[in-house]
Amino acid sequence: MKILPLKIQAIALVALAAGAGVAHAQTTVSTTPVGFITKTIAGAVNATTPTNTTLSFPLYAAADFVSSVASVDSNTQFTLTGASWVAGQFAVASSPRLVRVKSSVTASNVGRFFLVSANTTNQLTVTLADGVTDIHSALTVGDTCEVVPANTLGSIFGTLANLPTLQAGSSPLSADNVLLFNGVTWVTYYWTGSVGTPANIWKQTGNIDRSGVIIYPDESVFVIRRVVGSSAVISNIGVVSSSAEQSYIAGTGSTFLSNRFATDTTLGGLGLQNISGWLAGSSPTTADKVLLWNGITWATYYWTGTVGTPNNIWKQTGNLDRSSTVIPAGTGVFILHAGAPLNLPQALPYTL
């Protein structure tokens, strides 16, 4: 399977009032850049050689609500100041919501996010994941949270109301595919259009519409394009990150990690080598690894730390420091980690 590098066609950022269209408990005079990134998925080489493109989606949809934590009520529930919602409005499967920690008295909690499973008029219930077993460990009274629409297959790639630019098909072998990595294997989805059964749904197996499947902020995806010589364009429209981000790295396994910001970064800038628990080594067989697609094959990099030669560089082959290797905006990396799960905190790489 040949994988072609992603092409970033354009990014446009416009400063809009942070309060526009967003419910706030307090008045704010700050601004939040919003805009779009368009991504080109190259056409297939020929009828038997589809192309594959790595995508990530660093822009958020505009927040539904932003406020401070008034109380932490149980291991999965907390109340936000000034909330006055409709009960259940954030727990619709077809339009899931995430709650994200924007600021915290505990710096290491900034950037955490949780799926909203229920809400009352002022209280959120969340699904715990990524090593968090009690919301008390991730939230403190006074922390600032935002409720944001999650990116989904339907919101990113289109639905009947906003027809996908990807090719529809009656099976995954005739359609373009979107692949999500579940930590063990790839899960394949495709748009049935008017030729599949049922018609006009995002399908995996069975006849259930998968349009609401979440693409979490720290996830990358692959798109397989089968249309020969014809590219497709996918747009990610939304708000740039305005505070630090945090990504989860699975323990003793693989993670397909997104580039969290709408700007290029580097192997060194990603900051994996700074996390306690990241395994350095004298060779790729003894170290944790980062894999980048170079247009032909996966290129493997590892941090030498104090045990490798030369010390404290990102190494591929030879003795050159590969820390400046670029990870483009809108792409991702495969991480192979042999150890306990990790959280990767990332500070804003720009000034708002």
Image: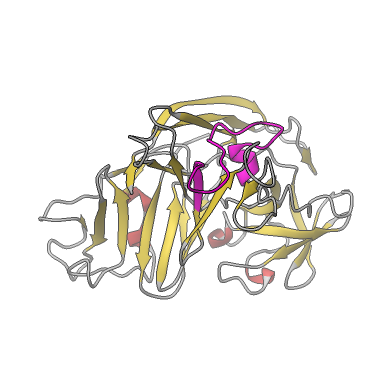
Q: Which residues are the magenta region?
A: 152-179
- Could you say where residue 262 lies in the image, as x and y percent from the top left? 47, 37
**Residue at image x 21%, y 61%?**
312
Q: Quadrant of residue 283?
A: bottom left
- Could you say where residue 251 lies in the image, as x and y percent from the top left? 44, 72
**Residue at image x 63%, y 36%?**
158
- Could you say where residue 235 lies in the image, as x and y percent from the top left? 54, 31
Specify the principal SS of the magenta part: loop
- Taking the view exactly as shown, the residue that stands out farthest to the left is 318
State whether residue 326 is above or below residue 73. above
Front-lying residue, 298 or 191? 191
Residue 310 visible? The answer is yes
Give the left or right position of residue 352, taking residue 93 as reference: left
Give the left or right position of residue 6, taking residue 194 as reference: left
**Residue at image x 69%, y 35%?**
160
Is residue 75 magenta-colored? no
The mark total stands at 0
State whether residue 54 is above or below residue 123. above
Front-lying residue, 16 or 298? 298
Front-lying residue, 273 or 254? 254
Q: How is the image coloured?
A: secondary structure
State whether residue 106 is above or below residue 18. below
- Could you say where residue 286 lies in the image, as x and y percent from the top left? 23, 73
Is residue 163 magenta-colored? yes
Residue 349 visible? The answer is no
